[in-house]
Image: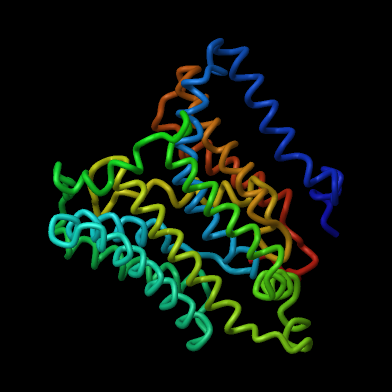
Amino acid sequence: MNRISEWFGGGAMQAAIPPALLVVLIVVIELAAPGFLTGETLALLLSNTAVLFILATGVTFVILIGGIDLSIQAVASLSSVILAQLLPSLGVLAFPIAIAAGLAFGLMSGLVHVRLRVPSFVATLATGGVVAGIALWVAAGRAITIEEGGRLYTGWINGTVHGLPVVVIIAAVVGLASFLVLRYSRFGRHSLAVGAGEPAALAAGIHVDRTKVIAFAISGTLAAIAGVVLAARLSSGSPSLANQLLLPAIAAVIVGGTAITGGLGGVGRTAVGALIISIVRIGMTFVGVNIFFENVVFGAVLIIAVAITIDRSKIAIIK
């Protein structure tokens, strides 16, 4: 019996918890540090959430099928390195190449998982190690600054449109496209079916392996897009640029209400989760909590969120 979920109401009540928590956090932080709800702070909040949301949206596809992707931070870092290195020579063509690298390694993770029958945890952990090694080799173990010539191609990412940061618009486009794919495409329906119960999905004639590979490919692609945006914002690419984003990205998905066991959730919930994580991060700064305490908070939040959302009926033994 999923008692913990029942304590929190289950169903619609459980789905309402993340949005309610978001509102409570905003109110608490505003009361603790008046001035939080200013236009400048909110713009900063949305801008800082954009990269996290793009990264978390990609891993949402994998978690919905009941898997996990632990390579996203390495893929994002590699794409930032590729972009920084190729911009001087290739200009705008560096963008699709950097993103294509993410697609390639996402496909690699998916194929290792389904063809070699390796658990997604191990497959993506190994792929992440390979990608991280390649990033270190390509960058010679150092950060690569995007010089003024390269910033001619990345400057638009740091701009605004009618006062709205372009990074927020990019995140919104990614979120809307992902929402439409999950809600209205056959792949989206199949993803939820695979996450809800793989044996039943197989019996229904769903091509489970293909669905899984596509999910990992999307995760890798969006991780690369997040890396490109991050590199443009920081004007540099680095083999470790996104290393601190893995835990917050996964936490954003789970905190938003997507079940770690798959089959329940979506991009809208991930958006709420990403805002919660960003508000917690910024809020800790506002109230004077040591920044090095962040991962402690994110880890605790992740444990609580998993305990609430996990569907124990799918797992006979927790191990």
Residue 102 is drawn in which quadrant? bottom left
Looking at the picture, tell me which residue is in the foreground, 251 or 161: 161
* Picture residue at 56% right of the left edge, 42% below the top: 274
Looking at the picture, tell me which residue is in the foreground, 33 or 54: 54
Q: Where is residue 167 shown, x and y percent of the image?
A: 43, 42
Q: Quadrant of the C terminus?
A: bottom right
Q: Where is residue 88 shown, x and y percent of the image?
A: 14, 55
Looking at the picture, tell me which residue is in the foreground, 93 or 81: 93
Looking at the picture, tell me which residue is in the foreground, 256 or 221: 221
* Picture residue at 52% right of the left edge, 60% below the top: 58
Q: Where is residue 163 shown, x and y percent of the image?
A: 46, 28
Is residue 33 depicted above or below 173 in this figure? above
Is residue 18 depicted above or below 126 in this figure? above
Colour scheme shown: rainbow
Is residue 292 depicted above or below 94 in this figure? above
* Picture residue at 48% right of the left edge, 43% below the top: 50
Q: In which quarter of the image is the N terminus?
A: bottom right
Q: Where is residue 56 shown, x and y percent of the image?
A: 53, 53
Residue 17 is drawn in which quadrant? top right
Most distant residue in the top direction: 34
